[in-house]
Image (cartoon, helix red, strand yellow):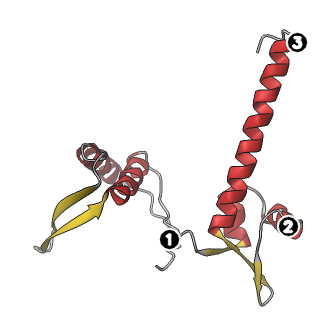
Amino acid sequence: MAAHNIVHLPTPAEMEQAKVSSRTLSKYADTDRVQLALRGSNGESDDLVLPGHVLQILLDVLSEISKGNAISLIPHHQEVSTQEAANLLNVSRPFLVGLLKQGEIPYRKVGSHRRVLLTDIMNYKKRVDQQRSLTLDELAALSQDEDMGY
């Protein structure tokens, strides 16, 4: 699958259509598969079957589009540049490179460029989010113990 670098922000009409389509498809969200009949504006029509987990992905996409958000689809085995990885983690590229050098996130070099697997970025993000949640729980417990009113 080719990566698409053009960001398309949904138009108000696309947002509304996504909302309507999402409502319709959500009736089938708990099924293990769904059969769809397609009719294109070009006169073509086909039937296809989607596994339930693919339908859930489609529902997630429609939900984001209905909110006006642009969507990118990246396969988990996809390698990304350090800038793309930094963007996914919402950190600066130099900060990300520091994480790579410290061994926090695995990477490989292609020539002089570092490449990072998306799965490794997502695993790092999950670890950091879990640690953040534990720290917040500890702070909340401590503030209650100290009767700080939080």
Q: Are marks 2 and 1 in contact (CB under 8 Å)?
A: no
Looking at the picture, does residue 143 appear above or below residue 42?
above
Residue at image coords 14%, 74%:
42
What residue is at 37 percent from the left and 53 percent from the top?
Answer: 56
Mark 2 or mark 1, which has the lower sequence index?
Answer: 1
Q: Residue furthest front?
A: 32
Q: Position of residue 65 (x, y in %)?
A: 40, 52
Q: Nearer the viewer, mark 2 or mark 1?
A: 2
The image quadrant of residue 48 is bottom left
Q: Which residue is mark 1?
A: 6
Label 3 to label 2: alpha-carbon separation: 38 Å
Q: Secondary structure at mark 3?
A: loop
What residue is disc 2 on? 103
Residue 107 screen position, x and y as percent: 76, 75
What amino acid is found at the position of numbered circle 1 in the picture? Answer: Ile
**Residue at mark 3:** 146
